[in-house]
Amino acid sequence: MPAGRPDHVLVIDDEAQIRRALTTILETRGYVVAAAEDGASAIAALTESTPDLIVLDLTLPDMDGIELCERLRSWLTVPILVLSVRADEADKISALETGADDYLTKPFSAGELVARIRALLRRTAPGSSVIPVFEADGLVVDLAAHRVTRDGAEVSLTPIEFGILSVLVQNADRLVTWSQLSDAVWGPECLVEVRTIRVHVSNLRKKIEPYPQVPRYVLTEPGVGLRFNAS
Amino acid sequence: MNPFVTRAQKIRDLVRRHGYVVAFLAAAASTAAFIPFRPYLGREQWGWLYLLVLGFIAGTAGVGPAVLSAILAFLCWNFFFIPPYHTFHVAESADVVHLTVFLVVAVAVGLQTGRLRDREAAALREEHHTAALNRLSGSLVSETSVDGLADAAAEELEHVVGAASAVLWVPDAEGGRLAPLPASESTEPEERRAQAVADLWRRVTEREKREVPLEELLAEEGACPADDEGDLRRRCLLLPLVSAGRAEGVLEVHMHGQLDASERSFLDSLAHLLAAFLESRRLNELAVHAAAAHEAERLRSALVSSVSHELKTPLASIAAAVTDLLDPDVPRDPEAVGDKLRDVVEDLNRLDSAIADLLDVSRLEAQAWQPKPDDFEVGEVVGWVVARLPRQARERVRFSVPENLPMLRLDFTQIARALHHVVHNALEYSDGPVTIGASIGASFSLWVADEGPGIADAEKPLVFDKFYRGASGRASRSSTGLGLSIAREIILANAGTIEIRDVHPHGTKIVLTLPLQGGEP
């Protein structure tokens, strides 16, 4: 987190207890937190000042959470973290399709929440946001040098595979949707089928995973995309 | 059935049904055959030959035709063989005696033989009918389906009364519309026939409501509209099938001719049998429904008691721990506070997984969780499940997944959830390593093997029951006993199977078998 200005977070949730808990968790970790209990007051708060991140619960008393997410996305670029409950998998997926950046299933621990928020803010932080080298359990990804090694041995990746891996590593622990991946690797004007991306991901796994048949780094998020598991 | 026997039976049948015609033909044919030999025999001997013909007719066609042929023989003998020929005039007085005695004896023989034949035929028919009814009551016991019974009844009717076809109409599950059986007989029931059957059914059920005596109900009988062939001799009968309790259905029989009394009584007995079968089947279904309702009630109450236990216990311990921590009078060091809070977190996880289980159960029971197939590789779903296990559990997991498995098309989330329950179960009921494996052939198998004590054969069918907890795991506290039943329901919803196998030397392997391509939603 940059030393100068603390990050601002807007929490939109209709449950007072959740708002209070999130406020406490985030404030004790140095964030500045504002809270809104419904869609209307969230929009009012957003017209006054723009936060660095929005935490949005999908069930709101006055409007549909997915609709709100879509409206916010039309004029805001800040990351949106969606809170969902287990039963609304379909809602979660449509929120991610309409512009949310990641999701967290209730109930969650303080640790999970903070890790998600940090991962989302890292991407948007200006300047030194890119991790130059990722290292875990014998896998080393040096983005600047375009070099990947597994247990010391160099791994040769195709440009597309390296592109996918670098997007995933830069967004470590964050959800990367299929369309985000397609935009980042092939370019926004290119419409690449998920099936095609899957083939490249499958090849990438064979090269970098310790046991490629059961991935532990490049995990699949059903119906949505991928998540690079760095922890 | 021997075709020769049926042909012989058909000829006998023909003679029986058309006895008078046969009597005429026999008299004419025998006379024509005798005339060329007229010079070789004395005129009085021809009487004996005519007696032979008469015996044959009496033996096969019965009393009436026998008497007719006695008279015909008398006339023919007189006309063709007693001089003067070709007149009924008798020249010699001795011939008058011959003729008179012949007539008396012939009629007497005809009457006697014909009566014997009739009695024998009746006895034989009775025997046939009894045998047919016996066979049918045998199939009442062995047949469980109405279709099978309808087939058996149609076959007997064809045999015994020579019915062209027989169709059994039974009310559907709601007791409303009547549907014809055997279904192959009339896939698209002719509108008029269906209407006639429905009319009879309505009359019978209305009378039944007014508590009309059984005999009167049985007397209700309909005729169906003429067959398309326009064959006037074809007759159709609609018989109500009435048991002691109520109307059970309608029997539609198409015949080639009239029924005699004994055939009619056979038909009635058969109708009684069918009604008895339909009644017992209906009562049986009622009993099965009652048992199912009882089972549903038992599960519901088990669910309520499990819910209250699985939700209240962690809640109670959280409440106790937190209120204790809030008590300002007790001095405590931060380590003890930390320990207490970690217990609270454990209880919270237990609450969360109990709620998740209940959510799964309710979604599956309401059939509100339809599979949504997606493309993925086996390993992706395994990785997803393992990544969500607690660290200590994750370290116990091994893999045995072959390389280059083809892509699957199934519901990722549901398969993951089923696998989660099976893996969780294996981790809970054993201490050693747990292996997750996969193989793909004609179908896709995903298996989880542990090295625990194994599951006794007697227990195997029970482990997929709701709320069943294995013998070795009764003490375990963090389980609703729903996991494996949820896994099974999910796998069944995805057109798969789940089974338990033993692992040598000890342990359990649970195998989920699924199609490579799930159905589209």
Image (cartoon, coloured by chain):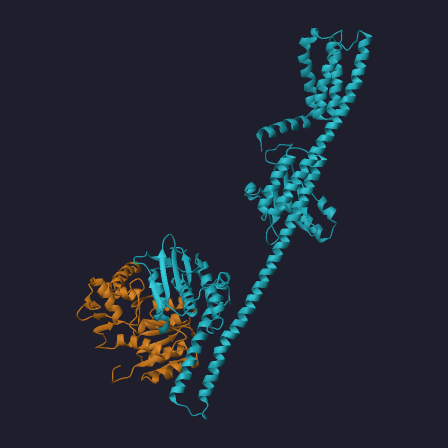
Tell me what residue is drawn at x 67 percent, y 37 percent.
B129
* Whether residue B229 is situated above or below residue B325 in the rendered picture: above
Q: Position of residue B444 (x, y in %)?
A: 38, 56
Locate the N terminus of chain B by quadrant: top right
B372 or B301: nearer the eye? Answer: B301
Tell me what residue is drawn at x 45 percent, y 92 percent.
B328
A191 or B441: nearer the eye? Answer: B441
* Whether residue A32 is situated above or below residue B146 in the rendered picture: below
The answer to which image quadrant residue B390 occupies is: bottom left
Locate the C terminus of chain B by quadrant: bottom left
The answer to which image quadrant residue A78 occupies is: bottom left
**Going by the image, does B445 lie left or right of A204?**
right
Q: Position of residue B514 (x, y in %)?
A: 41, 57
Of all residues shown, which one is farthest toward the left? Answer: A145
- Colour used to depict chain B in the structure image: cyan
Q: Position of residue B358 (x, y in %)?
A: 48, 69
* Whether residue A15 is situated above or below residue B80 in the rendered picture: below
